[in-house]
Image (cartoon, rainbow, N blue to C red):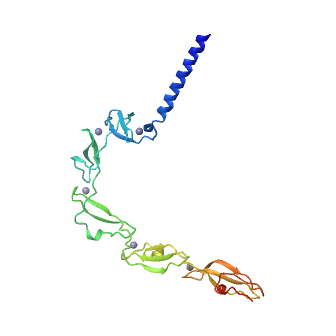
Amino acid sequence: MKTFKKSATILLTLLIVVLCIAVFAACDPKDDHEHKWQEVENTATCTAAGEIVSKCEVCGEEKREPSEALGHDWDEENIEIVTASDCQKEGAGKVSCKRCPEKKDVVIPKLPHNIKRPVLSKIKPATCTTPGSKEGECDMCKQYVTVEIPALGHDFSGTSVIVSEPSCEGKGIREITCKRKGCDGGENGKPAVQVIESPALGHDWQTRAVVDKDPTFDEAGKRSVHCNRCEKTKDDEVLPKLVAGQKTTYKWRISTASLSI
Ligand SMILES: [Zn+2]
Ligand SMILES: [Zn+2]
Ligand SMILES: [Zn+2]
Ligand SMILES: [Zn+2]
Ligand SMILES: [Zn+2]
């Protein structure tokens, strides 16, 4: 029985020691931070999975996570032309991967017909909103074709006209009319108009309240804060009627003498 007690005491002591070490380890200042992971390497390639190796900027600890294959990073802007396109057929080309030697085929879209000398009587000029057209022989395929001329869009580069200036509570409005001759993009076939709005200015409040009406024995007075630009007032305050024989201590303009009647 004694031996049992002894070994139990030893076991308990051991347990306490282990616990103490665990607690002490937890208090280690190095563990007292959120790791700041910085990727240092990714061993994955375009086609094969790999590992992302990250290092903590603070304690230098390393972690490894699986990474999927990256997929090719096609350099779509640099097309290597194999066969050029024209107005009759699409062309063929190749683009390369920015990371590995792999290449893939791409289609080069058809070109529009190119009329060098259109038939003058068949030219329908484009307007701001409606596409036009021209006819003639295509320089590439030598066929007689019709080609669309894209709509021009409105030209709002002119100067604007003030319709209303912005006020404390009202938006400012300016208008610019399309400069292009014959524009019919507006209402009832008139030229198109672009409306430019500027936000309301907001009130420009004075810093002090002013007395609008002095109080008398018969009527209450009023004071308020005024806007420098418009008639609006805020923080309206009633100044009570004067009472005979009573001192008033209102901080309005006659208050300095603390009125006593
Ligand atoms: Zn760390
Ligand atoms: Zn690749
Ligand atoms: Zn053509
Ligand atoms: Zn226009
Ligand atoms: Zn105002």
Residue 103, quarter of picture: top left
Residue 97, quarter of picture: top left
Residue 159 placement, left or right of 15: left
Q: Nearer the viewer, residue 253 or 148?
A: 253
Can residue 190 be seen here? no
Q: Nearer the viewer, residue 141 or 92?
A: 92
Q: Quadrant of the C terminus?
A: bottom right
Indicate the quadrant of ligand 3 in the picture: bottom left
Residue 218 placement, left or right of 70: right
Can residue 111 be seen here? yes
Q: How far across and how far down the image is residue 136, in percent?
A: 25, 63
For residue 91, above or below residue 4: below
Residue 49 placement, left or right of 254: left
Residue 111, quarter of picture: bottom left
Q: Residue at x 30, y 69 (%)?
A: 123
Q: Quadrant of the N terminus?
A: top right
For residue 127, above or below residue 238: above
Q: How far across and how far down the image is residue 255, in percent?
A: 66, 84
